[in-house]
Image (spheres, rainbow, N blue to C red):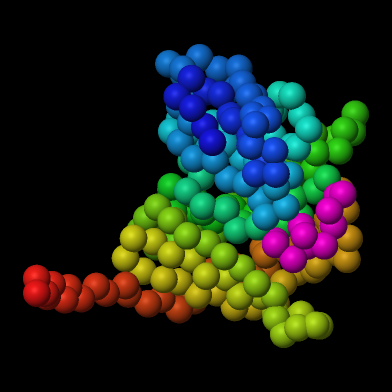
Amino acid sequence: MGLSNNFILLIELSHPEQVVRVPIQRKVSDFTIYKIFLDPSGRHVLVTSTQGENWYLFRGWKKPKQLKTFKMVMECVAWNKPALLSSPHATSTREMLIGARNGTIYEAVLDAEEDFFKSQERYCQPVFSLPEKPPINGIKFDFFPPPDAKKALVIVTTASRIYQFVGVPDGRPEEGGRDSGRVFAGLFASYKDTAPSKYYICFRLLPVSHS
């Protein structure tokens, strides 16, 4: 969880008495924690602020690191859950999609492995912007059909619509190493001149019985 004084509290339910406090070295007047995202394996933590500044914390680190190329307010993150859970000792986040407040979808990969010649930010690039640029409040992707996945499905939601993208991914390196290539750029590029499928979210209010 994130605190108003820019501390992150990490609690493992197997040892609830062992609370780890990790500070983000930023003044409260300059940095306000907005959301925290934890991957399914529990190793990768992303922290986004209302100012659009983002930080990354890997399990075991005593200090988070600022993501200088991640210049957006993150609203949601789609993790590659199968890949993360199948590699319990890997340091890479594998490919992930980020839904931002500015209506843009980003593809990114982080790797916590120390490398003198490379930063943890393997890449972060915009791959698609929704019409009218509404904040993206939900995003998820999956590969199909199992076990030989050749296509990808991406679902994106805003406050009023659901968008669906389907296509062939650019590539899926078996081990998701440090030099993994982009996966979703080609899929979203196919929608450059064709609007994605979209569905409106409708709500129906039902009468409440007081009996």
Give the residue at x 77% y 60%: 85
205 or 143, nearer to the observer: 205
Toward the left, the furthest residue is: 210
Instruction: Give the magenta range.
Output: 80-90
Which residue corresponds to the image point at 60% horizontal and 22% vertical from the top-left? 24
Residue toward you, 15 or 56: 15
Which quadrant is the C terminus positioned in?
bottom left
Q: Is residue 58 above or below residue 164?
A: above
Q: Is residue 179 visible?
A: no
When asked about the image quadrant of residue 127, the answer is bottom right
Query: Which of these two is toward me, 17 or 208?
Result: 17
- Seen in the image, is 80 located left or right of residue 188? right
Residue 102 counted in the magenta span:
no
Rendered position, 159 above or below 15? below
Tell me the quadrant of the picture where the N terminus can be found: top right
Q: Is residue 89 magenta?
A: yes
Q: Position of residue 58 (x, y in %)?
A: 74, 37
Residue 166 lies in quadrant: bottom right
Q: Is residue 143 left or right of residue 164?
A: right
Residue 45 position, x and y percent, is: 65, 41
**Image vertical order of residue 155 relative to residue 26, above or below:** below
The residue at the point 78 percent across, 32 percent down is 60
What residue is shown at x 81% (from left), y 67% (from top)?
172
Task: Locate residue 89, reporting x and y percent.
Answer: 87, 49
Report the side of 58 relative to 196 (left or right). right
Residue 207 shows up from this direction: yes
Q: Is 152 left, or right, of 112 in this rendering?
A: left
